[in-house]
């Protein structure tokens, strides 16, 4: 499962590159196309019925569908806010803030009564919040940084946490293809509806934009996110979220290589406590 997660990391990290190559395509359109393509890919594999439960207390089909749709709503919110943040911020700023999802998972666990996380997770939470404040403060005082983009990237990380937590629960009862078809499909429907409400049109796109959209769906979604959803059948959501922490590093390197996009100084400074905090959280979660 570690190898599967690493493959997912490599595929997901290229998402920011495909988004940049798509140019001025609206964020909602990119997000909707991404999950719609993945839904079409997995739909034929999802028609074999539900997996037999590992115990007798199996939720009803309606419950499974409803929870999967809820996960799709979180995924739709994640993509809509994150893609918009990528279009407003540097790759490094957006990826760092979105990758705070392990912290939000730990916070949600406490709020839901799952118990107090280990001391290392608490220390990691504080350090990550310090880094978040540094990056956010830079955005508020620097006119060249979009504070709305920072807020959207943070919201994207929170939505990702909800998506992973629900996925861990539902993957006990549904095969990967069945779950992702329901999840991606409901996310696509939500994003298409939002696009219609906001009067977003799919016209005038060049060949590069269409190829970037196709790559975003096939590589970053079909391979990337589905690898994580498959891994959720065996590992915890916080472990999957921790694997995603490599995305800001890989994304920043890819941004520098492909677009010669420099990493802002305050983002580098803020990344230090974030990465140290996440290291503490990883060690605590793994019981080391």
Image (cartoon, helix red, strand yellow):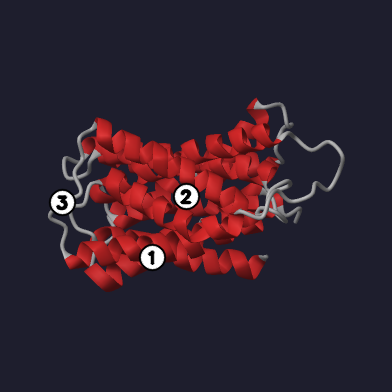
Q: Residue at x 20, y 67 (%)?
A: 208
Q: Nearer the viewer, residue 150 or 132?
A: 150
Q: Residue at x 12, y 55 (%)?
A: 204
Q: Establish if 198 lies above or below 237.
A: above
What is the crowding at mark 3: few (fewer than 14 residues within 10 Å), some, or many (at least 20)? few
Of tags 1 and 3, the one toward the viewer is 3
* Residue 114 image position (x, y, % from top left): 73, 32
For label 2, the SS is loop
Q: Which mark is residue 14?
A: 1
Q: Nearer the viewer, residue 102 or 226?
A: 226
Residues at discs 1 and 3 in contact (Cβ within 8 Å)? no
Task: Classify residue 6 as left or right of residue 186.
Answer: right
For label 3, the SS is loop
Q: Nearer the viewer, residue 5 or 220?
A: 220
Label 1, label 2: how many angstroms apart (C-alpha)? 15 Å
Label 1, label 3: how many angstroms apart (C-alpha)? 25 Å
Which quarter shows the C terminus? bottom right
Residues at discs 3 and 2 in contact (Cβ within 8 Å)? no
Q: Where is residue 123, by image quadrant?
A: top right
Q: Establish if 231 lies above or below 106.
A: below
Q: Which mark is residue 203?
A: 3
Q: Earlier in the sequence, mark 1 or mark 3?
A: 1
Residue 134 seen in the current view: no
What is the crowding at mark 2: few (fewer than 14 residues within 10 Å), some, or many (at least 20)? many
Q: Residue at x 64, y 48 (%)?
A: 237
Residue 9 seen in the current view: yes
* Residue 89 image position (x, y, % from top left): 26, 49
Residue at mark 2: 99
């Amino acid at each position: 499962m570690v190898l599967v997660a690493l493959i997912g990391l490599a595929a997901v990290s290229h998402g920011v590159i495909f988004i940049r190559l798509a140019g001025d395509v609206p964020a909602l359109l990119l997000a909707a196309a991404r999950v719609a393509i993945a839904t079409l890919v997995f739909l034929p594999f999802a028609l074999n019925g539900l997996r037999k439960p590992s115990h007798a207390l199996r939720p009803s089909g309606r419950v499974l569908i409803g929870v999967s749709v809820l996960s799709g709503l979180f995924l739709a919110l994640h993509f809509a806010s994150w893609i918009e943040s990528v279009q407003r911020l540097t790759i490094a700023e957006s990826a760092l803030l979105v990758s705070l999802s392990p912290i939000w998972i730990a916070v949600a666990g406490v709020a839901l009564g799952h118990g107090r996380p280990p001391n290392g997770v608490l220390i990691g939470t504080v350090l990550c919040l310090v880094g978040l404040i540094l990056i956010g403060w830079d955005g508020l005082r620097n006119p060249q940084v979009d504070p709305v983009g920072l807020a959207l990237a943070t919201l994207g990380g929170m939505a990702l946490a909800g998506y992973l937590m629900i996925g861990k629960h539902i993957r006990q009862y549904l095969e990967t293809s069945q779950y992702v078809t329901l999840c991606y499909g409901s996310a696509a429907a939500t994003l298409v509806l939002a696009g219609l409400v906001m009067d977003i049109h799919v016209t005038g796109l060049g060949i590069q934009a269409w190829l970037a959209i196709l790559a975003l769906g096939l590589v970053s979604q079909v391979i990337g996110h589905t690898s994580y959803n498959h891994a959720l059948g065996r590992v915890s959501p916080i472990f999957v979220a921790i694997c995603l922490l490599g995305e800001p590093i890989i994304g920043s390197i890819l941004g520098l290589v492909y677009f010669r996009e420099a990493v802002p100084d305050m983002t580098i400074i803020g990344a230090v406590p974030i990465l140290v905090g996440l290291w503490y959280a990883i060690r605590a979660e793994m019981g080391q």
